[in-house]
Each structure stands twice: as structure tokens, then as C-alpha cells.
Amino acid sequence: MAAAPIMLFCLNDTSTRWMMAVYTGSFAIESKGFTDIIDITAEVTQIMEQSGAGSGIAVVFVPGSTAGVTSIEYEDGALSDLKSAIDRLAPQDIHYDHDARWGDGNGFSHVRAALMGASFTVPFENRRLILGTWQQIALVDFDNRPRQRKVVVQIQGE
Amino acid sequence: MAAAPIMLFCLNDTSTRWMMAVYTGSFAIESKGFTDIIDITAEVTQIMEQSGAGSGIAVVFVPGSTAGVTSIEYEDGALSDLKSAIDRLAPQDIHYDHDARWGDGNGFSHVRAALMGASFTVPFENRRLILGTWQQIALVDFDNRPRQRKVVVQIQGE
Amino acid sequence: MAAAPIMLFCLNDTSTRWMMAVYTGSFAIESKGFTDIIDITAEVTQIMEQSGAGSGIAVVFVPGSTAGVTSIEYEDGALSDLKSAIDRLAPQDIHYDHDARWGDGNGFSHVRAALMGASFTVPFENRRLILGTWQQIALVDFDNRPRQRKVVVQIQGE
């Protein structure tokens, strides 16, 4: 999805003004599945910078029904704790109707993804994402095999 | 909420340009409650198309505190599995303080809705929602009775 | 974050037109932590009004990795029920790897926040947030101590 940076000028007065616009970027990332939690803050930041917008939102969206997006303090302890909580919430080793019908064995992945949500919106200002010091944006891949994931980041800003 | 399609032109140069704009649509849908999961992808797509915008976001929002919005592979097995996980997360047959106070018996519905979230944002480009092949947008009605739900879809795009 | 209201005029035709723009506001709020649920609807409404936009979205975002944002019927019973469900989902008194590493004792807070999500988007029209009658926007502070929280509200609208 190549797209030109946002540079719409308002030419009808003497000042040049940046107008609101949409910029859609994406990136691919390798995951191991099984609640693989991947820090994608750098990739989202890069697309935000490419957009040319100074303030606005970054909508981070993962197409597919076995992955989610959230934010977390990206350190091994918290990652391990989140995995444990998700294991309790939708254990892998119980019965899933999805598996009985389709045989792909990732019923637990679908449930986990629907509960976390595939979309995450973060505002930015002065070309900086408004995140806490210890807060990173994370793709969480719940599938039961390695995947190459495409993540879409749409910038709306001015 | 009748609204004209987005057709703002920038007339100050020789090219006609579509500008970013807001378009708010809505639709009503019948639900059976009790974690009724309803595929609303077609309705969201229609409002996106009516907006006239080529790229942007669709913010899908359900007013009310006993329903949520997420995405899922909309097939009976995964739907049944999601319902089971939600039953484990906030069972219907335990004590709820909300019920003790208000007597409407839907304390479990409020808890489930607050955990899932009432808002879901999906980007689109070239007039197509950016969803996975097996990923649908779903309204989840957690109330303890049939409801007619209004779902609001706000398009921001250009 | 002081910012001027959104008042961009399109001067190239005879009518004055409000254009889409971004307005970023924020407020500070005291929380007691331990799943303190705070109604922030009034603060979000005020920033929406200050923006000058008539229709658009309010993106409510809490920087930090131990708090979340959702909507709920803000009455004591439902709040207590939500707290109980979150206690079951990620109990405070089990082992957390985060605590073993960092010793700050808020591993459960990180897990809870990552599951709820730090971002909530609500549309508005005719200068009114599109919420249900009994639906309020809530900051949920999961940390294990009192905190002063900053909440960012970014308005995108016209």
C-alpha cells in the first residue's frame, strides 16, 4: 500500500495550512503463534512519521480472526503473566465446537482473539504517539502455528 | 440520521479534490439477547459505501451498557465457543450486586458488555473494509431478553 | 495541552464551512487504584464541546500500562460486579512473573489493563456523545496504589 505523505495545502489564503487527511500503511511480521506477543511500537511510529501528519490517530488493525492488538509494558514477566491469564480464560485443552467442525485445532485461538479485539487506536501529537513511558503497542497472535501477519496502520491527522 | 454523502470539493485549484469528512449512519437490528452474536458486516459496509469516502475508518458503536462489538470468524462452532468462554468469564447463575439493587436480573450482561467493549474501529481503503477473509464484524447482545438494538456507524474518510 | 478550538474556514466560496480538524485535550484525575472505576463522561463531554466540532469521534486514551477505559452503567452494583469478574479473571493473590522480576507487586494490574485495553472511541453528533441513557465512559485504574492519572481525549470532527 504505497501512499504519498499527507501534504494537502490550502492555497486560498496567504498561509499554507496542513489539512486533515488519511494515510494507510502496513507491514508484515513473523509470529510463532500460541499467544506470541510482539512489540510493534516502532513499526506504528514509522508509519505515523511517514504520513507527515503532526497530530491525529493511528488505528492499528490486524486482519484475521485469530490475532489481537493491545498495549502492555513489554517486559518478559508481564508478557508471561498475560499469557497465563489468557490460558485460564480460554484453555487450549478443552472442547471447542470450532475444532469439531473444521478440524484445524485453533478454536481456542478464535475465542481469545474475539475477546481481545483486532483493533487499537492511539492518538499522537507533535509527531509523538501518546503512550506511557512503559507502554508498548503489541500484536498478539493466538493461532496454533507460525504465521506471517500483515498489520494495517491507518493514520488520520493533520 | 439521514445525511448527505461526503462531497466536499476544494474549488481553489484546477483539480477537484475529495476532502475528509464525517458521515454518521445507523441501523436497527433485532436480537434475542443472552450473548446473541449477530453478523453486521453487511450493514457496516453499506454505510461505508453510502458515505462516498474511498478510504478512512468505520467506528462501529452500540449505545447501551449490555452489548458489545468485536470481530470473529462467523461460523457456528466459533460462535458457540465464544459464548462458552463468556459464560465461564461471567456466569449467569452467580450473585450480582446489580440484580440485588435493581431486580432486572441482567447483572451478568453489564459485566460481559463492559469487558468486551461497545466500540470497534475498522479501517477501509478503495471502498473496501480491511478485514480478513474469515473475519466478520459482530454485535454481541448480552442482555437477558430480546432487544431491538440501534447500531451507530460513523465514517471518517476522504 | 492548551489548543485553540477547531475553526478552520473554507474561504474560497461564499459560504463559510467548518472543516475537519484534530483537537487534543486532556485532564488529570485522582484514583485509588485496585480497580477503581471512575466516571469520566463529563470530562470527555467538556473536551468535545471545547473542540467546537459538531460531529466526529472522541478517542479516550489513558497513557500507562496499568489502566483501561470502557463504558458501563455507572451504578454501585454494576461497578462491584465488574470488579468481582476482574478479580476472577486475574486474581491478585496468585504468582506473577512481573512481580518476581520487578518487585512492585502490580503484575495483576498489568494483566488486567492489557485485557481491558487503554483506548475507547465514542462518536458524537450535534455536539452530543452517542451514548445510551445508562451508559457512562469509565476509567478503570488497576494499579496497586493511588495514582494521579492523565487521560487524553482527542477529538476528530467537523
Image (spheres, coloured by chain):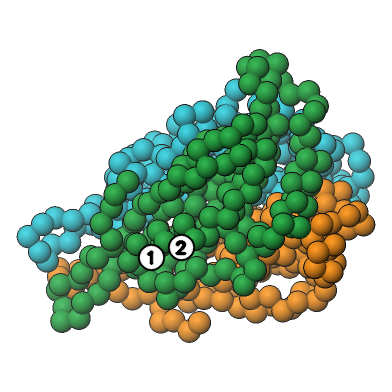
Chain colours: A green, B cyan, C orange
**Proximity of marks 2 and 1: CB atoms separated by less than 8 Å:** yes
Identity of the residue drawn at 72% across and 57% down: A76
| Residue B85 position by quadrant | top right
Which residue is the site of mark 1?
A49
Counting from the top left corner in percent of width and height, residue A91 is at 79, 34
Horizontal side of residue A135 vs C19, given as left or right: right
- Against C114, is B142 above or below? above
Q: Closest to the observer: A110 or B74?
A: A110
Q: Residues within 10 Å of mark 1 (few under 14, many from 20)?
A: some
* Side of C151 where A45 appears, left or right: left
Toward the bottom, the furthest residue is C2
Where's residue C76, x and y in %?
A: 83, 60
- Please name whichever residue, C120 or A133, is drawn nearer the observer in this view of the structure: A133
Check residue C86 in the rendering and tell me which mark sits there, or answer none.
none
Q: Is residue C2 above or below residue C54?
A: below
Q: Nearer the viewer, residue B154 or C103?
A: C103
Alpha carbon separation for disc pair 2 and 1: 6 Å
Q: Kindly identify which chain the residue marked by label 1 belongs to.
A: A
Of residue C73 and residue C102, the one placed in the foreground of this image is C102
Residue A35 figure quarter:
top right
Tell me if residue A59 can be seen: yes
Residue at point 57% right, 68% down? A131
**Amino acid type assigned to the residue bearing label 2 in the image:** Thr
Left or right relative to C124: residue B110: right
